Image: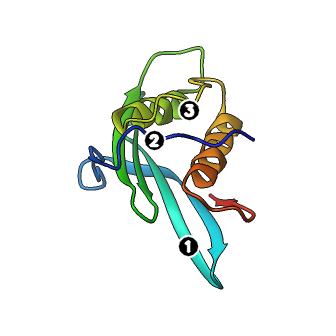
Amino acid sequence: MKKATFEHTTISNAINMSRDKETVREYNACVISKGRIINPITARWYMGRSKSASVVYCSLWISGSSIYLGGHGKAGGYGYCKFSAAFAEALRSAGINTIPGSGRGMSTVRDAMISICKGLGFNGKVTIIS
């Protein structure tokens, strides 16, 4: 799997929307580094609390030895995976433009998270906890 590359070391665009929106999904990337479990990536998806809510929001936090990135995105409409599309927007907001797969499903989200962990320098197995 290809390692993600980073143009920036710090971007803080993530938004914790739990006060106004309902958290509907969360993924955490976990790796073992120097005998400790590390959580370098957290992605949370939110939706409005009304039954007619259709827009999916995503906030993303990434941290490595010298990289601290955060981003947010949203996706609405029909005919594609809004969760992965919102994640792709959050990646762009965090300054990561090299990960393909917007709207193609959650397997692309998992692959992107693994690629980012590899880019952060974590060489061991990456486990995605949802």
Foreground of the two, 44 or 94: 94
Q: Position of residue 106 (x, y in %)?
A: 65, 38
What type is the residue that disc 3 sits on?
Ser
Residue 51: image x %, image y %? 40, 35
- Nearer the viewer's eye, disc 1 or disc 2? 2
Q: In this view, does 22 lie to the left or right of 81?
A: left
- Packing grade of label 3 (10 A; few <14, some 14-19, many >=20) is many
Which part of the image, by quadrant, shows the C terminus?
Answer: bottom right
Q: In this view, does 37 lie above or below 88?
A: below
Give how far apart the Cα atoms at labels 3 and 2 are.
20 Å
Label 3 vs label 1: CA separation? Answer: 23 Å
| Residue 3 at x, y percent in the picture | 64, 43
Q: In this view, does 37 lie above or below 123?
A: below
Q: Upstream in the sequence, badge 3 or badge 1?
A: 1
SS for dot 3: helix
Residue 84: which disc? 3
Q: Mark 1 points at which residue?
A: 38
| Vertical position of residue 104 compared to residue 40: above or below | above
Q: Are marks 1 and 2 in contact (CB under 8 Å)?
A: no
Q: What residue type is labelled 2?
A: Phe
Hey, what amino acid is under mark 1?
Ile
The CA span between labels 1 and 2 is 20 Å
